């Protein structure tokens, strides 16, 4: 599977043209959008996919210092389960230089696009208000 998600192709038919070549940039942008959605979804809130998403930040407050490892595990599980374009996923916690409660992670993986795999790195931050930033 490469390029845009099924729902994106349904919403925007120009992305669903037969035999259209998909650039690595388009695939990466689609993966970033999916990761944002995944990290913004509270695990257990989807009836059809109860393991989609990540643990709620408010639940993590009570489980420090194990909270960071728990968040990384749930992110990795969701990515491996629901984002088949990424393989060899490694998630590393990035220590914050500020005193805020924002969790920062670096996701490194291989992006599968067509016949080749490209190394990619994403920076993810989740603040206490559950605002997610994926770059």
Image: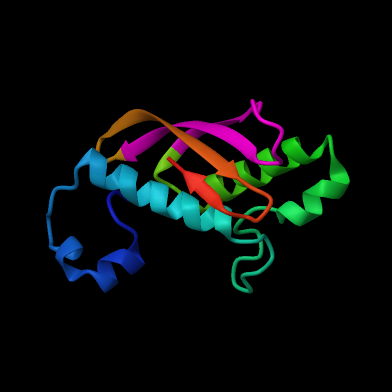
Q: In this view, does 117 lie to the left or right of 66?
A: left
Figure quadrant of residue 96: top right
Q: In this view, does 134 lie to the left or right of 57?
A: left
* Nearer to the camera, 55 or 4: 55
Where 84 sits versus 50, above or below?
Answer: above
Residue at 19 percent across and 64 percent down: it is 16
Q: As drawn, which residue projects farthest toward the right?
A: 62
Percent x, y of residue 101: 71, 41
Percent x, y of residue 65: 84, 34
Percent x, y of residue 82: 51, 53
Q: Main secondary structure of the magenta part?
A: strand
Label count reads 0
Q: Does the magenta stretch include residue 45?
A: no
Q: Is residue 35 left or right of residue 69?
A: left
Q: Does the magenta stretch include residue 94?
A: yes
Where 35 sits versus 87, above or below?
Answer: below
* Nearer to the camera, 99 or 76: 99
Residue at 77 percent across and 55 percent down: it is 58
Q: Give the range drawn in magenta.
A: 87-112
Where 75 sits versus 7, above or below?
Answer: above
Percent x, y of residue 112: 34, 38
Figure quadrant of residue 111: top left
- Work out which quarter of the rendered image holds the C terminus and state it: top left
Residue at 61 percent across and 70 percent down: it is 46
Residue 114 in view: no
State the scheme by which the image is colored: rainbow
């Amino acid at each position: 599977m490469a390029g845009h998600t099924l729902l994106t192709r349904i919403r925007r038919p120009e992305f669903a043209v037969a035999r259209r070549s998909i650039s690595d940039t388009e695939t990466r942008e689609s993966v970033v959008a999916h990761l944002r959605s995944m990290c913004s979804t509270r695990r257990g809130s989807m009836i059809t996919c109860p393991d989609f998403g990540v643990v709620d930040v408010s639940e993590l407050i009570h489980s420090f210092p194990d909270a960071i490892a728990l968040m990384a595990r749930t992110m990795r599980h969701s990515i491996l389960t629901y984002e088949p374009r990424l393989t060899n996923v490694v998630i590393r916690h990035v220590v914050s230089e500020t005193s805020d409660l924002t969790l920062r992670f670096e996701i490194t993986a291989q992006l599968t696009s067509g016949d080749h795999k490209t190394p990619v790195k994403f920076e993810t931050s989740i603040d206490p208000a559950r605002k997610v930033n994926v770059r």
